[in-house]
Image: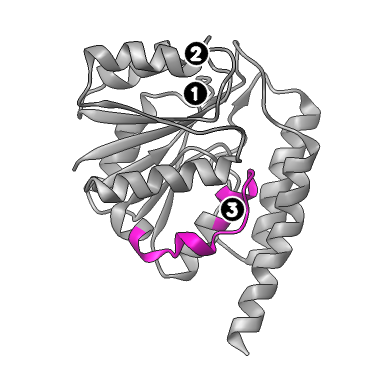
Amino acid sequence: MRKLVIIPTYNERENVEAMLSTVLSLAGDFSVLVVDDGSPDGTAEIVKQVKIASPERVFLLERAGKLGLGTAYIAGFRRALERGYDAVFEMDCDFSHDPNDLLRMAATLEEGEADVVVGSRYVKGVNVVDWPMRRLLLSYCASRYVRCVTRMPVRDATAGFVGYRAEVLQTINLDEVRMKGYGFQIEMKYTAWRLGFRIKELSIIFRDRTAGTSKMSGSIFGEAFWGVMGLRLRRIKKSK
């Protein structure tokens, strides 16, 4: 399988070079597309330097400003499909997602065990390290809320460490994906599930970032909360 890892960035100069180096060192020849939203700290310039040594495996999409996590991934998905990748992965740049877990996730897709694979914090207990209790409870309860409202059998619906077979992204109408923040992660999983694609969760250990600044905010959770209600209501309207 030709595999592409999409990494959205905004002010990740402390992490991006190490992340690219780690992913490129993995077995399996993963390529990487960094989607940078106009980082003023020079993140894109660092990616350009790494790209010089690996021009066939490192790619950069520069955007004019902070346009939202969801739109960054959708732009990356379109690039991946245009270039004929068989599997596409989402992950953060801050090492909260362990790049080594990409190997297990890729094998799950390649061996036909699933169409969508989720690096899950909650499929086997709670595997989160160094998060404040308030944030952990908010995240865990958000996933429980999503399961309750949508009835989707995924324990970590808000997870941002995800792999898709290209067929899934080709089938989903990306123009109709509405949520731009972390609610985007829920909407993509829900849409894939409603279309009949198989989703499998693999247990991972999620660690809080040690460098750089978190992009999480109350507005992001607000969009996810109300957006989930919208997903369910749209489904009900379509079934009438």
Q: Residue at x 74, y 44 (%)?
A: 221
Residue 81 or 192: which is nearer the viewer? 81
SS at circle 3? helix
Quadrant where the C terminus sits is: bottom right
Here the colouring is one colour
Tag shown at residue 15: 2
SS at circle 2? loop
* Mark in front: 3 vs 2: 2
Quadrant where the N terminus sits is: top left
Mark 3 in CB contact with mark 2 (< 8 angstroms)? no
* Mark in front: 1 vs 3: 1
Q: Which residue is mark 3?
A: 186
Lateral position of residue 234 relative to residue 91, left or right: right
Q: Residue at x 78, y 48 (%)?
A: 222
SS at circle 1? loop
Q: Which residue is mark 1?
A: 93
Q: Residue at x 62, y 48 (%)?
A: 180
Separation of residues labelled 3 and 2 (CA atoms): 26 Å
The range drawn in magenta is 170-187
Q: Amino acid at mark 2?
A: Asn
Q: Residues within 10 Å of mark 1 (few under 14, many from 20)?
A: many
Mark 2 in CB contact with mark 1 (< 8 angstroms)? yes
Q: Amino acid at mark 1?
A: Cys
Question: Which residue appears farthest toward the bottom when viewing the image?
Answer: 240
